[in-house]
Image (cartoon, coloured by chain):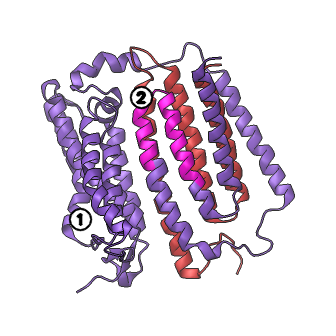
Amino acid sequence: MSAATLYGLCSAVLVGLGLFGLIVHPQPLRKILAFNLIGGGVFLLFGVVARRGAAAGFGGDPVPQALVITGIVVAFSATALAVALLLRLFQETEQATLRLDE
Amino acid sequence: MTIALVFDIGLAVLVVTVASWTIAARDTFAAVIGFVAFGLLLALVWVRLAAPDVALTEAAIGSGVTGGLLLGASTRLRHTEKLPAGEKPGRTLRLAAAVLCALVSAGLAAIVLLLPEPAPTLAPQAAANIAATGLGNPVTAVLMAYRAIDTLLETVVLLLALLGIWSLAPDRVWGGSPGLRHHADPDGVLTFAAQLLVPVGMLVGIHIFWVGSDAPGGEFQGATILAAMWILATMAGLVDAPPVSRRWLRLLLVAGPAVFLAIGLAGYAMAGAFLAYPAPYAKLLILTIEIPVTLSIATTLALLVAGPPERAPQQ
């Protein structure tokens, strides 16, 4: 098995783990964390595709690599916005929950 | 079995183990620490996948700045950790979720194993045209020339996220400074570390940005290091976050996207298309874009971490 395939399988497990955390954790901050884990897995899958496309003297296809860099920065800005929303919710209601009742 | 393969298997197992820990840990703070470790391990994986540019980004943004942001949030939300009864999902839901997620993983794993051979790639096209951009790093060439529109939109997305965060401020503190004023012991270790590290870190950040045209690095990685140094200086109380209504601050924030857009539009006149660079001036134009973009990204990242204004503006 090549290193690319190995890390491809690793990325598949990461997406599954993150999705599981996103579903079962009731705390919003844990959901944000799990969302970032899914992101890590998806980016890694991109990296595997890039590695398999190594050609012309490059260790990997630079196009998906550049897309991943863009993706990491955008994922961070989405995380920052989500955390700010959550802290504002906490400021207003003194709790951080996604329950709808009350 | 070669040494490299043993290393790869060990690293993959470690990444999955740390990721499981961040999901399984009871304490959110501990989970975030796990996430930071996960990000650093992932950066190693990126090196193994021959993507040093991505490794730098992952270590700086994915692990470092995101980790710092989540650590701050988890300390503030510490006493909301204890869940009221009935909010934890039941055994059936957990089992159903586990089955669903296992299916998703299995599906992705099947896709990985069935990827077409030989793999489609744009590397030859990237190599064929790199001389026209005057750059040596193919990833920077993609970011700044072939797919420059993605990078332009990305700088706008960062600004939009910051606007979203700022708009969460209550009316009475609008235009004020983000976060609380940090005070650290002037003779303490944190102040000393900040005084020692910040100048060195700023040099490293500028270096990483500068070498990005020919070597691994670039504006995002350099900007993140610059932002991290500013965050360290504010944490040590050496500088204070400026009020968000300051005109110089807002100019700094929009300078990057504005210059990028202006040069992009000038592309119509100079080379006949949006974001097209005339070949003899390509590198000069790319650098002219990159310098303000780096400053804008660094400022935006630092303010994204600082959060919405929390102190009323001083009259």
Residue B209 among magenta residues = no
Find residue B252 and report its image quarter. bottom left
Q: What amino acid type is highlighted by mark number 1?
A: Leu
Q: Is residue B265 visible?
A: no
Find residue B184 and report its image quarter. bottom left
Q: Residue at x 61, y 22 (%)?
A: B5
What residue sits right under mark 2 in the picture?
Answer: A63
Can you tell which chain is drawn purple?
B
User: Could you tell me which quadrant the C terminus of chain A lies in?
Assistant: bottom right
What residue sits right under mark 1 in the picture?
Answer: B249
> Which residue is farthest right?
B92
* Spatial CA span between label 1 and label 2: 33 Å
Can you tell which chain is drawn red?
A
Q: Position of residue B200 (x, y in %)?
A: 27, 51
Look at the picture and state if B76 lies above or below B34: below
Q: Main secondary structure of the magenta part?
A: helix
Q: Nearer the viewer, residue B254 or B70?
A: B70
Q: Residue at x 31, y 15 (%)?
A: B128
Please give the chain letter of the residue carrying mark 1: B
Graded by Cα atoms within 10 Å as few (under 14), some (14 to 19) or many (20 or more), the crowding at tag 1 reads: some
Q: Is residue B245 visible?
A: yes
Q: Position of residue A67 (x, y in %)?
A: 43, 36
Q: Position of residue B246 (x, y in %)?
A: 22, 71
User: Could you tell me which quadrant the N terminus of chain A lies in?
Assistant: top right
* Magenta span of residues: B34-61
Q: Nearer the viewer, residue B30 or B112?
A: B30
Q: Residue at x 28, y 70 (%)?
A: B238
**Do callouts 1 and 2 mark residues in contact (Cβ within 8 Å)?**
no
Q: Position of residue A79 (x, y in %)?
A: 50, 57
- The mark found on residue B270 in the picture is none
Find residue B199 and report its image quarter. bottom left
